[in-house]
Image (cartoon, helix red, strand yellow):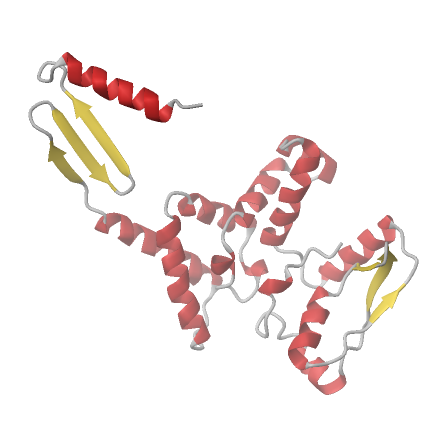
């Protein structure tokens, strides 16, 4: 029930809980139920991670809870720090399977505008290395995550390289404001794009290839190349790219 992603929790994102755990331990137990021999926790993932970090006992009260009660406990557990757009997007990605991939149907079931759901899903499409740069996932809004995801598409390696640089700086103690992270990633992509030079190569008369990043554009002048050559090229494309 608890949708918080525990692998994104650390001492920084749990700074509001760590001090009290160190001095007094866990004061408020998590709530859970037992289903088919498995303990299903409704809330408390932040407390669980804090208990692991501080070496404290993790306390859970197990009761006879129905789905509605579990949902309610999960909701109020997230009211202190609302579920991030990234975490919501992960949940929407899973739920889409129940609606045959229809964002519209999911939006109606959730009672949420489908543009918001789309933005959250796109935000969830960003790799964890990028999300981990932020102090906690909630610092990245759905709109900013959506815009960042659009830039990420087609620039995956460049953005991941930038993320690794920022993560190294973060580990060295540097703190980043959310907007600075977003701007740094965008600037890196722009700089990388400028550094990517277009190259051009001529293959005899009538054939020119233009190379730009991952793309190659071939131009043929049928007036200057034999028809047999064009036929061979077409046959090659058909045999290699139209295989069933």
Tell me if 67 is positioned left or right of 43 in this view.
right
Q: Quadrant of residue 208?
A: top left
Q: Is residue 184 visible?
A: no
Side of 183 where 201 appears, left or right: left
Residue lying furthest right in this view?
64
Front position in the image: 71 or 157 = 157
Residue 4, percent from left and from top: 67, 59
On the question of residue 211 being in view, the answer is yes
Q: Quadrant of the N terminus?
A: bottom right
Which residue is painted at 50% across and 45% down in the image? Answer: 146
Provide residue 20's location: percent of width, then percent of height: 71, 81
Q: Is residue 153 left or right of residue 220?
A: right
Rendering coords of residue 6 (x, y %): 64, 63
- Residue 37 at x, y percent in the picture: 85, 58
Residue 200: quadrant of the picture: top left
Q: Does 227 appear above or below 8? A: above
Q: Residue at x 53, y 44 (%)?
A: 122
- What residue do we see at 37% from left, 59% from top? 162
Q: Quadrant of residue 34?
A: bottom right
Q: Which residue extends farthest bottom? A: 23
| Image quarter (top left, top right, bottom left or bottom right) of the C terminus | top left
In this rendering, the count of numbered labels is 0
Residue 208 placement, left or right of 102:
left
Is 79 or 41 nearer to us in this picture?
41
On screen, 42 above or below 207?
A: below
Q: Which of the two residues, 141 or 10, is positioned nearer the viewer here?
A: 10
């Amino acid at each position: 029930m608890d949708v918080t992603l525990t692998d994104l929790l650390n001492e920084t994102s749990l700074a509001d809980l760590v001090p009290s755990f160190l001095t007094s331990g866990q004061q408020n137990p998590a709530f859970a139920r037992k289903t088919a021999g498995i303990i299903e926790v409704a809330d408390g993932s932040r407390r669980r991670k804090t208990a692991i970090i501080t070496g404290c006992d993790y306390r859970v009260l197990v009761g006879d809870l129905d789905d509605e009660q579990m949902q309610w406990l999960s909701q109020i557990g997230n009211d202190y720090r609302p579920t991030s757009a990234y975490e919501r997007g992960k949940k929407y990605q899973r739920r889409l399977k129940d609606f045959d991939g229809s964002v519209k149907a999911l939006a109606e079931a959730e009672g949420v505008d489908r543009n918001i759901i789309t933005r959250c899903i796109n935000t969830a499409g960003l790799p964890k290395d990028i999300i981990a740069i932020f102090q906690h996932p909630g610092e990245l809004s759905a709109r900013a995550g959506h815009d960042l995801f659009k830039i990420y598409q087609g620039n995956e390696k460049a953005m991941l390289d930038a993320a690794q640089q920022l993560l190294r700086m973060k580990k060295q103690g540097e703190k980043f404001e959310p907007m600075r992270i977003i701007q740094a990633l965008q600037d890196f992509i722009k700089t990388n794009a400028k550094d990517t030079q277009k190259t051009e190569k001529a293959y005899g008369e009538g054939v020119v290839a233009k190379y730009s990043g991952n793309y190659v554009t071939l131009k043929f002048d049928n007036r200057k190349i034999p028809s047999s050559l064009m036929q061979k090229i077409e046959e090659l494309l058909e045999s290699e790219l139209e295989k069933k």
